[in-house]
Structure formats: C-alpha cells, structure tokens
Amino acid sequence: ETKTNLSVTVVGASGDLAKKKIFPALFALFYEGCLPQNFTIFGYARTKMTDEELREMISRTLTCRIDKRENCGDKMEEFLERCFYHSGQYGSEENFAELDTKLKQKEGGKLSNRLFYLSIPPDIFVDVVRCASERASSKTGWTRVIVEKPFGRDSESSGELTRSLKKYLAEEQIFRIDHYLGKELVENLSVLRFSNLVFEPLWSRNYIRSVQFIFSEDFGTEGRGGYFNNYGIIRDIMQNHLLQILALFAMETPVSLDAEDIRNEKVKVLRSMRQLKLEDVVVGQYKGHSKGGKTFLGYTEDPTVPNDSITPTFAAAALFIDNARWDGVPFLMKAGKALNTRRAEIRVQFRHVPGNLYKRNFGTDMDKATNELVLRVQPNEAIFLKINNKIPGLGMRLDRSDLNLLYSMRYPKEIPDAYERLLLDAIEGERRLFIRSDELDAAWSIFTPLLKELESNKIAPELYPYGSRGPVGAHYLAAKYNARWGDLA
Ligand code: BG6
C-alpha cells in the first residue's frame, strides 16, 4: 500500500493516555514496519504547542518496550519527523477545518485514510466527532474513529451517546476500544479453548464449578480522583474489561473468526446474563494505612475526591448466565485499587472428581483436590493447570502441583502492548476486538439496575486498608456460592 496515505490524529494529545500509551504504540508499530510508508501523525489539543514541542514531549515519554533496542534512536528521529501538532478547541469546526488543510498538505492529493483517536473526556466526544467528521474527514479514503470508555454511565446515557455518534458516523467507522481485549492472554483465551480437545469438552456446567475474573492494582486513584469518583470501579473495570473477558470465555463457538460472527456470539451470551442484584455484590473503598514507616492516603483523603464520597474502589460480584451451558455456575468478579498486589487473571475451577479414589489422601478438604486452570493476564503472563500428583517417595501422599507455561521462558520475545495490537487492527479495519453497539447495550443492561440501586440507596462501601487484600465481604460472597477465591487460596 505504498501509495496510500495514513494519518492518525490523536485528539487529546497532551493527556496521560496519549503520552503513556498511544504515541509509544504508534512508534512501536512504525519500528516494526507496520505503518504504511506515507503516514503522518497529528496531535490535537487545546494547549498551545509547536510541532517541536510535541516531538519533545513524545520523545520524553516514549518509554515503550522498543527503547531498549538497537538503532532505536535513528528510528525515533524518523518517527518524530512525521509527528505534527495542531492546537484547537474541541468543539470548533473552524479549528478542525484548519487541521483538514494541514492534513491535505501532507497527503499531497493522494488516496488518504484518516484515523482519529479520541483520548478525551466523554462529555466532548460528540462535539469532536461532529467537527472531525464534518470538517476533517477523508474525501478519498476511509475515516475511522477510535473511542475510549467511558461510553456513558448507564444504559440510558450510553444509548444516548451511541445515537449521537451515529448522527455523524456509521457503526463501521466507530472503533470502541477496550484495551483488555488486546492483551495477549485474553486473545489466547479462544485459542486455548477452541483448539484444544482437552479443554473445550470440559467448558460447561458439567465440569466447571466456578469461573473467576480477578483484577487488582497495588496503587490507588492518585491524580485520577476527578474522573474516578464519577465512575467507580464497577464502571471502570467490571462492566467493560472483566465482562468482555467473561463474554469471550463463555460464548458459544462462533461460526468463523470473522468479527461479526464473534461479536454475535458475545452479544448472545451477554444477553443471556441475569441482571446483577445488590445481594450478589460487595463494594469497598480503601482507607489510609501506614506501613513500614510510609503512609498511604485513603481514597477520600485525595484532594480531588470529596470527603464523603461513597464511590467504590473495590467490588466483588457473582454473575450468572441463564443458558444451557452455564446454568447455575457462578462467574465471580473481583476488581480493586490499592490492594496488596497488581494482577489480572482468569481462574477456572473445576468440580471434584466424583467418588475420588484418593479422597482419604486429601483429608476432608476436597476443595484442595480440584483442578484449576489459571490464565495470568499480567504481570508475567502464564497459563497453569493445577493437577493432583503423587509426591515422590515410598508413601502415598498427594499434592496439587502446577503444569506451568510461563511466557517469559517459552516465548522470550517481548509481548506487544495491547494498544499496538488494537491500533494496528483499527488501521487494518479488523473489528474483532472492538465493541459493537449492541454488545455495549447488553453489557450496560446487566449492570445498570445495580448501579442505580447502589447510588439511590447510598450503599456505604466496606472500608479496607490501603495495600490489604480487600474487604472480607468478598469471601462471604464466594462462600455463598460454594466457591473460594483462587488468588487467596
Ligand atoms: C483502565 C482503567 O481502563 O485500565 C484504569 O480506567 C486502570 O483505572 C487501567 O488502571 C488498567 O490497565 P492495565 O492495562 O494497566 O491493567
């Protein structure tokens, strides 16, 4: 495609996400030779900045995986030469028309595709989309827009946003990003399941006792309190990242690997899910804590958070899929900030072996004798399967050991960042890993009544110390469904 131009305009170029993820991902794609020969990158934001200043800003934060490589410096120079900046208001047609003029200059009349990445707060999505599509869309090639969550805060506002965006863009032009779908282990989930005979036949209520989706971070919301307090952990992590993984995990076999076939199955399984009930949810909020001479501030002590905030920074939930495959199986989710560790994982807990011959060797605790398949999404990507094994020796003692696929050993090559995969897919028009609007509707339907109930009843979160394992309520929730959290076992 040497004749085609590509421009990527990062709207909100001076923001955190742009600096930390988007520009580094674009650079990595350039470094790997994945961008067309004629490409241009534009930063767009309100801040006044020259092209040089943008380059300087980007180069300071290109702390991507590439920067350890050979000739990274030369490549970076080449890359930066293709980066430009246009300062403008987000709702100004005139400013977008100016951008259009600059883009045209770079494109030199050739067939040109334009990708806009909206890395901006949701209240200005529609303005930007209106201005960009009316004044700066490509006349010769495609125009696509990547949008980042939050896509609304409940069913109604999300529906409203979808309708407004559709005034200016066709669904095929909108790429709703959920960066968890670009993570290596999440992509691998379907490969693991659908291409291994040892797993697919077990993937149902007949053999699986509970499935757990766990997200934890060992830092709080410092610096992002303003955004976070409006949304809370359920909207920030569960309704999107964890639910997306759940949908991939639980969907029926798609007709093919085409985006529409996969997304059809995801919508189906999401629509089979029960609306979440208050009694199946535990919410928490971290409080200040001193450890080893260091003091960690509680959530409400953050100056950007109101003192009386009851926004959850932790939540655990039990979800159910009312279909033939999953009837009665608890899908447990847990997400929290300021916990003891940073990790994301999927845990599949299998049932007991019926009439286990070796029951005696496990004592009475048969929980210790069940198989568990773990996909560690991060950090240190790995897949392991817990199996029962005889401890070598003359006696007959058993233990549960891991069959371990540690990515750093098996695949020492670095793993691309999720944003690289997703940006490349958007450029190539591959929609498999982006969220379709009906998927989004189905996802909100599961959480909206609960969120309203939590908020209208002002349910107070259970406090947990910064750096702890989170509220004990989460244990009771799992126990209610005869499960225990695999990460704490
Ligand atoms: C974002 C959330 O979507 O994902 C953040 O808004 C969270 O609150 C982040 O920290 C986690 O992403 P990752 O890739 O660092 O696990």
Image (cartoon, helix red, strand yellow):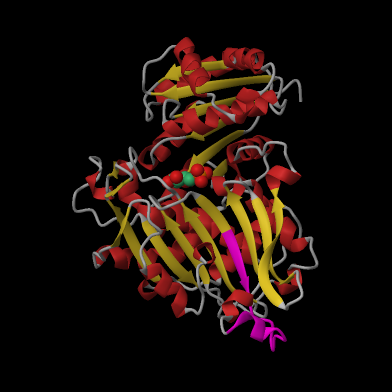
Q: How many marks?
A: 0
296 above or below 461? above
Taking the spot 22% from the left edge, 40% from the top edge, the residue there is 303
Position of 31 with respect to 233 (left or right) is: right
Q: Residue furthest left?
A: 307
Q: Is residue 114 visible to us here?
A: no
Q: Position of residue 208 (x, y in %)?
A: 64, 75
Q: Is residue 186 visible to us here?
A: yes
Judging depth in this view, the residue of 8 and 479 nearest the camera is 479
Taking the spot 57% from the left edge, 62% from the top edge, the residue there is 246
Taking the spot 64% from the left edge, 78% from the top edge, the residue there is 351
Taking the spot 59% from the left edge, 12% from the top edge, the residue there is 81
Q: Any magenta on residue 449?
A: no
Q: Any magenta on residue 350?
A: yes
Position of 216 with respect to 410 (left or right) is: left
Q: Position of residue 118 (x, y in %)?
A: 48, 35
Quadrant for the N terminus, please: top right
The quadrant holding residue 77 is top right
Judging depth in this view, the residue of 482 and 171 nearest the camera is 482
Q: Position of residue 393 (x, y in %)?
A: 76, 71
Q: Position of residue 429 (x, y in %)?
A: 67, 40
242 above or below 268? above
Position of 337 with respect to 453 (left or right) is: right
The quadrant holding residue 198 is bottom right
381 above or below 253? above
Q: Residue furthest bottom?
A: 355
Magenta residues?
346-363
